[in-house]
Amino acid sequence: MNIIVCIKQVPNTTDVKIDPVTNTLIREGVESVINPFDAYAIEEGVRLKERFGGKVTVITMGPPQAENALKEAIALGCDEAILVSDRKFAGSDTWATSYTLSCAIKKVGPFDIILCGKQASDGDTAQVGPGISTHLDIPQVTYVKKIEEISSNKVKVERMTEEGYDVVETPIPCLFTVVKEINTPRLPSLKGMMRAKSAKIAKWTAEDIAADPKNIGLDGSPTRVVKIFTPPPRKGGEILKGDTSDIAKELVELLKDIVI
């Protein structure tokens, strides 16, 4: 079984910086970690390999420093790692990012299952995974909490909902976005860390993956961030004192002012 895991390296939540000119996240030189939800995708990919054999290829799009995230994924049990990195990708929104990753996946070759975390902690859009499946024209199931059965041509999974879960069956190849309920990520083993230390990370540019220049970076991004600002601090609330009936009347008058 050929499994592909798409991950993202994100800034630590305490160290997020915005470029005032482009209104995009500054990633180079910023301390970063593997997106927390992607850790569950890595773990599930390794578990599937342990159950059914095959290999796990991990892919990320990002600056050169994202190689650290790929090495960490190898330490956790992934077999091969690919860094898709090019200045031309700068400013990509979720649509351009999913297109770029889909081009890299096509270059990797035949696959059975693609795994992604349900969303990234820096953008919280949950759009890249579904976008990849759209570009590849394959079925997708989001918010997967359990992979139940896998046969030669189909997979049965549990998809988490607000009321419980749905049981969904889909043909292979397919893409899943996973939630944290799916597993508990392991810690890297000593053997895994040694292998990661000497692992060779493939580095692909826009030309290497045959990406259309019109579909990548800012030019390929239909989303535009016009302005980024910090909301003003909330004002403290007002405590009403006195008799209950008087408080009720005063509250009604205050609500009238808000509505008006």
Image (cartoon, helix red, strand yellow):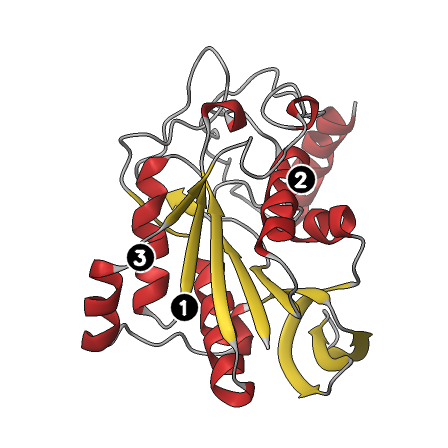
For the residue labelled by badge 3, is the local secondary structure a helix, a strand or a loop?
helix
In the picture shown, does residue 34 fall above or below 141? above
Q: Residues within 10 Å of mark 1 (few under 14, many from 20)?
A: some
x, y percentage for residue 178?
A: 59, 67
The disc, 2 or 3, on the residue closer to the chain's N-terminal end is 3
Of residues 36 and 209, the one nearer the viewer is 209
Question: Going 29% across and 74% down the picture, which residue do you hit?
Answer: 187
Image side of residue 87 versus residue 156, left or right: left
In the picture shown, does residue 12 fall above or below 114? above
Q: Quadrant of residue 220?
A: top right
| Quadrant (top left/top right/bottom left/bottom right) for the C terminus | top right
Disc on res. 99: 2
Image side of residue 27 versus residue 48, left or right: left
Q: Which residue is mark 3?
A: 71
Task: Kindly report the distance in space between the C-alpha atoms of the residues bearing marks 1 and 2.
Answer: 24 Å
x, y percentage for residue 6?
A: 53, 55
Residue type at the position of mark 1:
Asp
Of residues 240 and 55, the one nearer the viewer is 55
The disc, 1 or 2, on the residue closer to the chain's N-terminal end is 1
The disc, 3 or 1, on the residue closer to the chain's N-terminal end is 3
* Count of numbered circles in the view: 3
x, y percentage for residue 118?
A: 59, 58
Image side of residue 102 versus residue 50, left or right: right
Frontmost of labels 1 and 2 is: 1
Question: Going 49% across and 79% down the picture, which residue do you hit?
Answer: 183
For the residue labelled by badge 1, is the local secondary structure a helix, a strand or a loop?
loop
Task: Kindly report the distance in space between the C-alpha atoms of the residues bearing marks 3 and 1.
Answer: 10 Å
Q: Residues within 10 Å of mark 3 (few under 14, many from 20)?
A: many
Q: Which residue is mark 1?
A: 79
x, y percentage for residue 230?
A: 46, 24
